[in-house]
């Protein structure tokens, strides 16, 4: 009985090897997530009453200003990681 010829896989190119887990996009995403954390946990940097903004002491409006800023930075990190994951799978990054 004749047997089917076996196919030999093509030799591996260096580009087909494992990709590094730490990429520039992931580093930037990590920085985007750490900025709001550090800025709100470093209390001595904003533990004061002045300057006031529309009658609100600095302590309060500084913390409230970080709510939308954190949302923007978190979304930016999400987009960066999603694009990085898509490019690792070989898909087109949008």
Image (cartoon, rainbow, N blue to C red):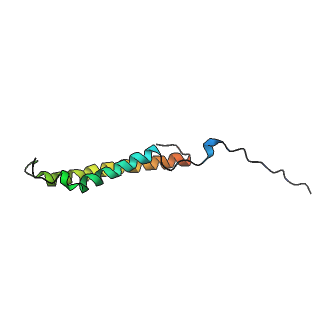
Residue at image coords 42%, 47%: 27
Residue most extreme to the left = 55
**In the displayed structure, does residue 13 sit left or right of residue 39?**
right
**In the displayed structure, does residue 92 sit left or right of residue 46?**
right
| Residue 72 horizontal/vertical position (percent) | 31, 48
- Which residue is more in the foreground, 80 or 2? 80
Which image quarter is the N terminus in?
A: bottom right
| Residue 7 horizontal/vertical position (percent) | 78, 49
| Residue 14 horizontal/vertical position (percent) | 63, 42
Residue at image coords 84%, 50%: 5
Residue at image coords 19%, 51%: 45
Residue 13: image quadrant is top right
The mark tally for this picture is 0
Residue most extreme to the front = 44
**In the displayed structure, does residue 19 sit left or right of residue 2?**
left
């Amino acid at each position: 009985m004749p047997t089917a010829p076996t196919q030999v896989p093509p030799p591996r190119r260096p580009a087909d090897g494992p990709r590094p887990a730490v990429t520039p996009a992931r580093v930037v995403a990590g920085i985007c997530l750490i900025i709001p954390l550090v800025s709100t946990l470093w209390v001595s940097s904003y533990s004061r009453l002045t300057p006031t903004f529309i009658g609100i002491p600095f302590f309060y409006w500084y913390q409230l200003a970080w709510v939308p800023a954190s949302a923007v930075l978190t979304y930016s990190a999400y987009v960066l990681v999603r694009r990085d994951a898509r490019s690792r799978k070989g898909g087109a990054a949008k």
